[in-house]
Amino acid sequence: MMPNMDPKQMARMMKQMGINTQEINAERVIIETADEKIIVEPAQVTKISMQGQDSFQIAGTVRTESSVNEEDVELIMEKTGASREDAAAALEKSGGDIAAAIMELQGEE
């Protein structure tokens, strides 16, 4: 923001430049990558439209969760006889270490 500029003035100036903003009523934003989920919660989201392109500005508290590999979960299920939920939980708890997850489910930890 420009110092000493009224927010209404700023909005009018942006509109004259063809920039439109819209507040999005979002509770949470989840960004999924190959390795993890980035979760912003609570989220403040602003949609910015300019020259036919939409952008989103996201602000809030950020935390990450590691993603579990489905093949690893199936391997753990096969080796231990555990349910999908238990295998995924053990894999996440072990930080993706398959051997540690199997040992935990077999009670060898």
Image: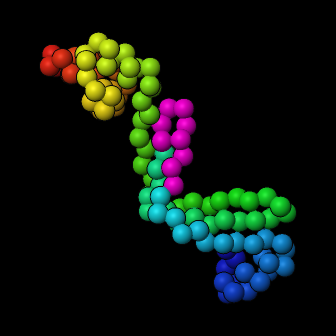
Q: Residue 70 at x, y = what percent?
A: 44, 25
Front-lying residue, 6 or 73 = 73
Name the residue located 44 percent from the left edge and 20 percent from the top edge: 71
The stretch drawn in magenta includes residue 32: yes
Q: Quadrant of the N terminus?
A: bottom right
Residue drawn at point x = 51 percent, y = 49 percent = 30
Please, which colouring scheme is shown? rainbow
Q: Is residue 55 above or below residue 1?
A: above
Q: Quadrant of residue 99?
A: top left
Residue 92: % across, % down: 34, 31
* Residue sticking out furthest to the top: 79
Q: Is residue 16 visible?
A: yes
- Give the camera-side residue of 42 and 73: 73
The image quadrant of residue 33 is: top right
Q: Position of residue 21 (x, y in %)?
A: 70, 72
Give the residue displayed 51% in from the left and 55% down from the top. 29
> Is any atom of residue 94 visible in this view?
no
What residue range appears in magenta? 29-37
Whether residue 49 appears in magenta in the rendering, the answer is: no
